[in-house]
Image (spheres, rainbow, N blue to C red):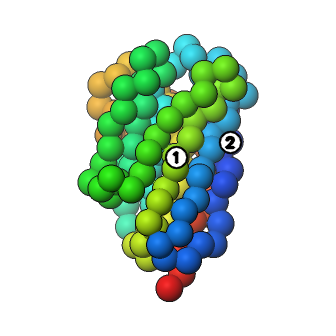
Amino acid sequence: QVQLVESGGGLVQAGGSLKLSCTSSGRIFNMDVMSWFRQAPGKEREFVAAITWSDGGTYYGDSANGRLTISRDSAKNTGNLQMNSLKLEDTAVYYCAAKYGSRLLRVASAYDVWGQGTTVTVSS
């Protein structure tokens, strides 16, 4: 059973940077995709970025806009999301998720495992 734990969230000023990490307690390498979603208050959960575990292929949502970079460390069973030039609208709870298969990777309901989320707050 794969379990995911996010870390790295916090309070940051607009224009600053944060690095989120997602650590798996199980055999994440048996899963095909690790992704990040986010959910702002009163809004639906939004796809941020995904990485295929086998070859490191990356996919980004519209919010990434060249500011976000997803990566993985296979040896540590960890996925990361580097966020630069943060904006007020990046404020949200960020969730790590993993799934089998590489289809529908932008669809939250297609994911098999979720972390508990980490909160990112961007202040002016």
Asked whether residue 28 appears in the rendered view, the answer is yes
Dividing the picture into quarters, in which one does residue 40 lie? bottom left
Q: Is residue 24 above or below residue 37?
A: above
**Disc 1 marks which residue?**
81
Q: Quadrant of the N terminus?
A: top right
> Which residue does the image show at 60% across and 27% down from the upper left?
73
Left or right, 92 with reference to 74:
left
> Which residue does the image show at 44% across and 76% down from the upper left?
88
Q: Residues within 10 Å of mark 2 (few under 14, many from 20)?
A: some
> Which residue does the image show at 34% across and 22% down from the upper left?
102
Where is residue 22 shown, x and y percent of the image?
62, 40
- Assign a secondary structure to mark 2: strand
Q: Is residue 93 above or below residue 51?
A: below
Tell me the distance, in whole angstroms, between the alpha carbons under discs 2 and 1: 13 Å
Q: Is residue 43 above or below residue 63?
A: below
In this rendered view, identify the residue nearer to me: 116 or 36: 36
Task: Look at discs 2 and 1 and give the one toward the viewer.
Answer: 1
Where is residue 31 shown, x and y percent of the image?
51, 19
Amino acid carrying label 1: it is Leu
Amino acid carrying label 2: it is Val
Q: Residues within 10 Å of mark 1 (few under 14, many from 20)?
A: many
The disc at residue 5 is: 2
- Assign a secondary structure to mark 1: strand
In this rendered view, identify the residue nearer to me: 27 or 123: 123
